Image: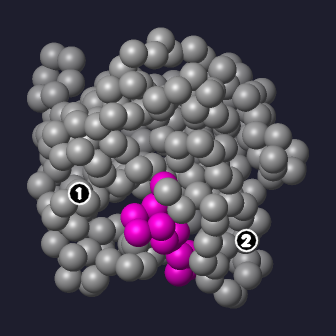
């Protein structure tokens, strides 16, 4: 594992924010894709449309900036009938210098190839295969991926079954000036988010978890996450709706009940963990 100074590379980014109008419209609320508001993120981005999700990929991080889904009860039921077949593969629609390769993830202790739009959401074998594109994958802490995050994904699927249909956007956050780099190429997120929007109420909120072996997460309003991420995730949503964080289902993981916290309380818990680590 290496470190990577993110600011040096992003400083040369385009000064124009990009809006992505794509034929992936079915994956986005009201058919409207997010808009990058932090111009530093806009460099070397590419839209990738898949059968059941849509990605905007960064050639800087060699991960997606987000992966979006329209998740319905029918899709969840169909996905439950499929066996998972691991078929990780490089994305051939991306330039080789801009994409992650299988070798980047080889022999990386403590990190998994974590899905953004989960394979468990995919309703057909071909859609499941597409979900294993490395454009829909990021370096995720193994414990987080296999426990808390997996159960967040299950909770979101249960919500889709209960409500009928929801929209989700999942992506990485790269916080701080120095970000870890996988195999000298792929940036390792410091945090991971999943936004959920209930189409019946028009309300939404986001799960946010540190990319570490944690058993807790914070809940952010869409407005708060947009400020942190530098992305307008829902251009057609009112500011008032973005500020109104809906209650998210609390995942129950193996052996313990995960606790969701507001961002201030989560920050305090993170500081406490850091102090405890220093005192060991």
Quick one: SS at disc 1?
strand
Residue 28 counted in the magenta span: yes
x, y (%) of residue 161?
23, 37
User: Can you say whether 144 is above or below 222 in the image?
Assistant: above
Left of 43 or right of it: where is 248?
A: left
Q: Residue at x 22, y 67 (%)?
A: 202
Label 1 sits on residue: 198
Residue 200 shown left or right of residue 206 in the figure: left
Helix, strand or loop for disc 2: loop
Q: Which residues are magenta?
A: 27-38
Q: Is residue 69 visible?
A: yes
Residue appearing at x 69%, y 87% in the figure: 15
Task: Check residue 12 for magenta coloring.
Answer: no
For disc 2, the marked residue is 43
Q: Quadrant of residue 113?
A: top right
Mark 1: give few (<14), some (14-19) or many (20+) Cα within 10 Å. some
Q: Residue furthest bottom?
A: 15
Q: Which mark is residue 240?
A: none
Q: Position of residue 224 (x, y in %)?
A: 29, 72
Distance, label 1 to label 2, CA atoms, is 31 Å
């Amino acid at each position: 594992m290496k470190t990577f100074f993110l600011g040096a590379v992003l400083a040369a980014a385009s000064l124009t924010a990009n809006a992505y109008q794509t034929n992936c419209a079915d994956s986005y609320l009201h058919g409207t894709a997010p808009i990058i508001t932090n111009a530093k993120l806009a460099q070397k981005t590419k839209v990738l449309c898949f059968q059941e999700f849509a990605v905007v990929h960064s050639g800087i991080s060699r991960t997606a900036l987000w992966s979006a889904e329209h998740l319905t009860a029918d899709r969840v039921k169909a996905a439950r009938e499929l066996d998972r077949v691991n078929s990780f593969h490089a994305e051939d629609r991306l330039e080789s210098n801009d994409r992650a390769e299988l070798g980047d993830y080889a022999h990386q202790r403590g990190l998994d190839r974590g899905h953004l739009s989960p394979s468990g959401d995919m309703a057909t074998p071909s859609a499941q295969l597409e979900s294993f594109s490395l454009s829909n994958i990021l370096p995720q802490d193994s414990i987080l991926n296999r426990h808390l995050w997996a159960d967040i994904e299950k909770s979101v699927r249960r919500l889709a079954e209960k409500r009928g249909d929801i929209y989700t956007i999942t992506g990485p956050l790269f916080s701080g000036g120095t970000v870890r780099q996988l195999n000298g190429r792929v940036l390792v997120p410091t945090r991971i988010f999943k936004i959920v929007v209930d189409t019946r109420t028009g309300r939404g909120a986001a799960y946010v978890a540190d990319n570490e072996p944690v058993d807790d997460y914070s809940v952010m309003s869409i407005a708060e996450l947009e400020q942190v991420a530098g992305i307008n995730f829902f251009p057609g949503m009112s500011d008032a709706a973005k500020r109104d964080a809906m209650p998210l289902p609390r995942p129950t993981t193996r052996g313990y009940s995960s606790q969701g916290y507001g961002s201030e309380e989560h920050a305090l818990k993170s500081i406490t963990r850091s102090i405890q680590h220093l005192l060991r």
